[in-house]
Amino acid sequence: MLQSQTAYQRDTSNITGNGIPLSSQLWNQLSSGTVTGQLSSSTNTVKQQLLSYMIRLNYSLKDKYLLTVSARQDGSSIFAEGHKYDWFPSAALAWRISKENFMNDASWVNDLKLRVGAGVTGNQAIEPYTTQGRVTSLFYPFSSTNSPGSIFNPLFANQDIGWEKTTQYNLGIDFSLVKRRILGSLDVYTSSTTDLLLTASIPAVTGFTQSFFNIGKTDNKGVEINLTTVNISQQNLMWTTTLNAAYQKEKIVSLSNGNQDDINNLWFIGQPVGVLYGYKGLGVWQVKDTADMKGYASNSFTPGSVKVQDINGDKKIDPNNDRQIIGPTRPAWVLGMTNTVTYKGWDFSIFMYGRLNYMWNTGGEGQAARGTQREINYYTLNNQNSEYQKPTFNAGNAAVDPYYTALGYKDASFIMIRNISLGYTFTSKNLGKTGISNLKLYAQASNPGMLYSNIKFLNMDVAGPTWNRGFVFGVNATF
């Protein structure tokens, strides 16, 4: 354990961290300079514990009206003393409609249940020891030897933080139809999350740059669909399809400073937590736009330069007036579909997965020369209808065009094949007297490729340029 004492003589009456007022307790921790951390150069082992107490009540009336009420208290070792424990109650009511007398003539309905519920859940999604303070070990030269030492981590250990809480209300329906050939569920929900565990900047006068805070409130609305259909059901042939789809729309309702946007941390009231914020690219300037380009003050636009949106039309491109929200970084839709076919001893399945309606910052194409770069469709006088700007560089090998990143914001939607498998299981008759009781041959292909992707040069499943494709051939045998 290490301790260090540093005295700060400051006027702290108006100290705020990025608009976040620092509590007297937090400022006392900062100004005292007393930080306790753990220094280890031999192991990355961490210890984390959860302790929960729960009580649950279930009640059923005629197997038609179902009630569940529960309350739990969770404690996490991650938080500091006084903030480790919190309560999370929930309740749910279900009505099995298919049991009612008026459903007797609906023979095509095998099961139909309506559900409504409300509950509170907690989130402790920060790393262990975050509230205890950290130090970074190092060795520095002293005379003829290297002496061990340490420096403080720039993330300050805020011991005031506690559980992030989400209160959710849900309305759902479960169904089984047509002799159980169609099964599934549909859920519609709305939720509100308070005391979000997020990092925010704090004044550098404290000796640190960031800390975790319980900040603000967000609202979410969404729909979840689960559907399974038995498309073919015969003696030797079976084909089933399972579809999962989830839609979510989220927004920030308030931050620690009320309804004021926090541009430094890219948090905007009424917008999702994760957004891209910058200049919106409108393609590249053309030769025919020469007169318009010259009308811009303090900008050396030429044909082939990146064209960005001038929001207020003042013929100036500046960060205060012309940056805007480009789009969300979290998908609105997450989809998955599995098709499984069995025929006699054969079985085949294919799993497809997708994320839709979100944006990704690919970084643009600086084209500053000498750097390794993929082949792109760039501007020339013979190729004016291009995707990217013309190549430019200066003596420092840096991009001259300061807005090249505006062409890097892309729709990241994709649908891919995650897995394809094919197998054949031998019957006992086929195996005869071989001494093998069960034998199956199979082949699998993992991540074979994309069905659709707007960003061709990245694998958006992992948001990187690498593909983890795999092909497996195997035998399962029991003797």
Image (cartoon, rainbow, N blue to C red):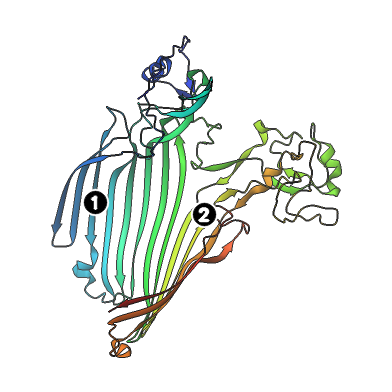
In the image, is residue 462 above or below residue 76?
A: below
Q: Residue at x 55, y 31 (%)?
A: 264
Circle 1 is placed at which residue position?
A: 92
From the top left corner, tell me how far across and down residue 215 is, in percent.
42, 32
> Looking at the rendering, which quadrant does residue 453 occupy?
bottom right
Residue identified by numbered label 2: 462
Q: Amino acid at mark 1?
A: Ala
Question: Counting residues from the N terminus, which is met first, the one under dot 1 or under dot 2?
Answer: 1
Determine the image quadrant of residue 172: bottom left
Quadrant position of the C terminus in the picture? bottom left
Q: Residue at x 53, y 22 (%)?
A: 144
Q: Is residue 210 visible?
A: no
Q: Amino acid at mark 2?
A: Val
Report crowding for label 1: few under 14, some 14 to 19, many 20 or more residues within 10 A (C-alpha).
some
From the viewer's side, name the closer residue of 101 and 6: 6
Establish if 411 lies above or below 23. below
SS at mark 1 in the image: strand
